[in-house]
Amino acid sequence: MTSSGNTVDDDDTFKILIATDIHLGYLEKDAVRGNDTFVTFDEIMQCAKKNEVDFILLGGDLFHDNKPSRKAMHSCIEIMRKYCMGDTPILFEILSDQAVNFGNSRFPWVNYQDENLNISIPIFSVHGNHDDPTGADGLCALDLLSCAGLLNHFGRSRSVEKLEISPLLLQKGSTRIALYGIGSIPDERLYRMFVNNQVTMLRPREDENSWFNLFVIHQNRSKHGATNYIPEQFLDDFLDLVVWGHEHECKIAPVRNEQQLFYVSQPGSSVATSLSPGEAVKKHIGLLRVKGRKMNLQKIPLQTVRQFLIEDVVLADHPNLFSPEQPNVTNKVQAFCQEKVEEMLEEAERERLGNPLTPEKPLIRLRVDYSGGFEVFNTMRFSQKFVDRVANPKDILHFIRHREAKDNVKEDSLNFDALLSRPSSEVLQLRVEDLVKEYFQTAEKNMQLSLLTEQGMGKAVQEYVDKEERDAIEELINYQLEKTQRYLKERRVEATEEKIDEEIRRFRDSKKNTSEEDEEVQEAINRARAHRDRGDSVRENDADLSDEPVDVTMESDEDSAPGPPVRGRGRGSRGRGGRGQSTATRGRGRASASQSGRGSRSQKAPLSSPAKTKSIMEAFRAPTQRSSRGQGSKSYAEEVRIDTLEDESNENVCASLSVSALFVSSTLQSGPHARSGPWVEFLALGHIIIDDDESDEDIYPVKTSKPTQRPASAASSSRSSQSQSQTYKGVCFEDDDEEEFDPFKGSSRRGRR
């Protein structure tokens, strides 16, 4: 097999157009760059038709968004229908079982063999990390195109434990190609599969050595962490060519891996989605010719890609022009930067001459290193000079500074400034779950997760951020609590905090980096999607739940008549009410029912909550519930008690749960961007801190007391009634649906001060 040479186009030669990371819909709302992705995709398809290719092979990330806009989907369908449909005959055939290759489709056969379609250029594509399958049915944007008959989506896998790759077997004349593909999978999971020998690539039974083995993958190629990439050495050595997607830098020329003896081609993206050096490399697509076991890859430069020029400037390297001690040094630096930008614009204009397809306004990025005592200046004012000449006037300049390492620095906390100051190529690949994992690795001991794993929490946050699964984190916590409660019951652990802590840690560590961990996250995500679907249907059918807040009534043994809302210390119409008591009866006191006793200090307005609000009791409820108030002492996993103490100076609520050390440590606190449902910070000592700035009521701290035996008789002393009225079944909080959740932004308000 060779990667070069003269390959004549004949009946035995496959001609395949290769492209990856087209990112349709990127910045589609931008007035200048909005149509760049669609124009370039049209050029790619036009090139395929011009060269009369047998099929088009895409390496993932056809769309930039997981849920493409109507404009992006419409433009994609329009271009595919324009170039892929026609009467041109298909000159190759598929020998493999198509029901296996396209088993996830309702139409498990290649589109050009559909009697209702007239396809001239088939498209085969794997999904990327931007357009991967989501939702309860596991659908992605490529499935819509596949169902419409415009594209053949292959390389999907639903298993999180092992991966079995069955190739598409193609034949044209005497040339036979085994086409393998893997859609985007979380790198850590796929890495673990390879390490555990759970990835199997099936090979044809007949004449194994006569097939040209082509493999398409969409994963990290460069190392971004210990397991956050896929080494080339993991791939089987019988492969001939690997088409690597996801990496945006164009390295389309095949490079031989001397250890595995196959070639790797990295076409890169067709649009610059970040202003990093890797994106400044000239964009290409490839025309692959395969005959027998020989191949030839022709690079085709894209003409409609917007020019991108990037340059680095270190101010300290020009002492003859300016120094930090000089007066008006900022003006001199600004003039120097303006001169550099002008030079870059002139260079872009020279390159654009003779190519009318290239967009007029280029992308310009000047990275200025101002280390050594220089000061930054107003970049917006600087950019105003180039508004009509560049496509990115808001971010022409990027100031960076290399800080000197301090010998005495011993901080273990995560430095987010250092993360954000990373090179742009690294920031491009930085993911939310990596930030979560890195945070907990450097967090203090008392802020470590006690029940959840870092990987599970990171993936749940990733689902929230990327896929807008609003209940992913909440459902993960609830699911882990239920599972841990069941585990502790089965183990019959001694009801002491030390024993339970030790058992919980053992249970948590046993799941790390295993398929069980992935399954738990997937189950939580499925629950969140189902909860979202049910919530949508409930809001449609019940106007009360969607239009007005709901008064939440705590569980009580007996009903009591609600009193008028009174603020502060005051007497209600029936004597003194319990502190924190709302118009809906709270606690288990009997004084309100008999209209006697002094079981309350004041009455409060009812806490309102949207339909999605859950109480702590619901979040921590064990499979078996309390059936009657006449029972004796309960197991540690079945009862939650919250007792109140009076404290006029504190307005936070600290609820200590006697769930016997079933606790979680999380740093995702409430704040101005709280998600639907309050954020609860689970500390390592089992406390729950609830920030509620929306309520005007005085809320006081509470602390744990040991469970007490409930009196059997209805007649009890007023002191007993008062004590009983302070025991609640659960606590509900208010939602703030108007604000978004930002898991990495600390709480900006800790109660009213």
Image (cartoon, rainbow, N blue to C red):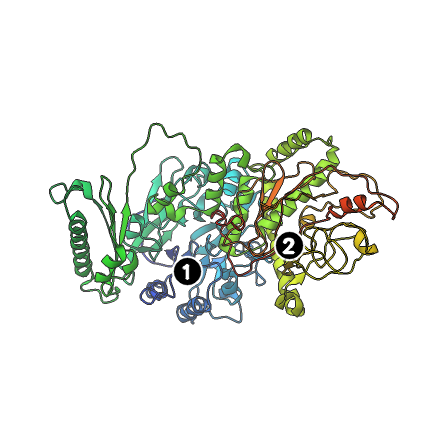
- Residue type at mark 1 is Phe
Using the numbered discs, state the Cα–Cα distance from disc 2 to disc 1 in whole angstroms: 75 Å
- Residue type at mark 2 is Gly
Quadrant housing residue 72: bottom left
Inspect this view and state whether residue 660 appears: yes
Give the number of the disc on residue 593.
none
In this rendering, is residue 563 above or below 510?
Answer: below
Q: Is 64 on the left-hand or right-hand side of 600? A: left
In this rendering, is residue 334 above or below 358?
Answer: above
Q: Is 331 on the left-hand or right-hand side of 709? A: left
Q: Secondary structure at mark 1?
A: strand
Number of residues whose C-alpha sits closer than 10 Å to that of mark 1, classed few (under 14), some (14–19) or many (20 or more): many
* Relative image position of residue 511 (x, y in whole percent): 60, 37
* Relative image position of residue 676 (x, y in whole percent): 57, 56
Inspect this view and state whether residue 625 appears: no
Choose the circle earlier in sequence order: 2 or 1.
1
Along the line of sight, which residue is nearer the eye, 114 or 329? 329
Number of residues whose C-alpha sits closer than 10 Å to that of mark 2, classed few (under 14), some (14–19) or many (20 or more): some
Along the line of sight, which residue is nearer the eye, 722 or 749? 722
Residue at (47% x, 39% y) in the render:
439
Residue at (47% x, 35% y) in the render:
442
* Relative image position of residue 488 (x, y in whole percent): 71, 36
Along the line of sight, which residue is nearer the eye, 598 or 131? 598
Mark 2–mark 1 CB contact (< 8 Å): no
* Relative image position of residue 214 (x, y in whole percent): 43, 48
Give the number of the disc on residue 568.
2
Mark 1, residue position: 55
Which residue extends farthest left? 320
Q: Is 632 on the left-hand or right-hand side of 18? A: right
Which residue extends farthest top? 408
Along the line of sight, which residue is nearer the eye, 247 or 285? 247
Q: Secondary structure at mark 2?
A: loop
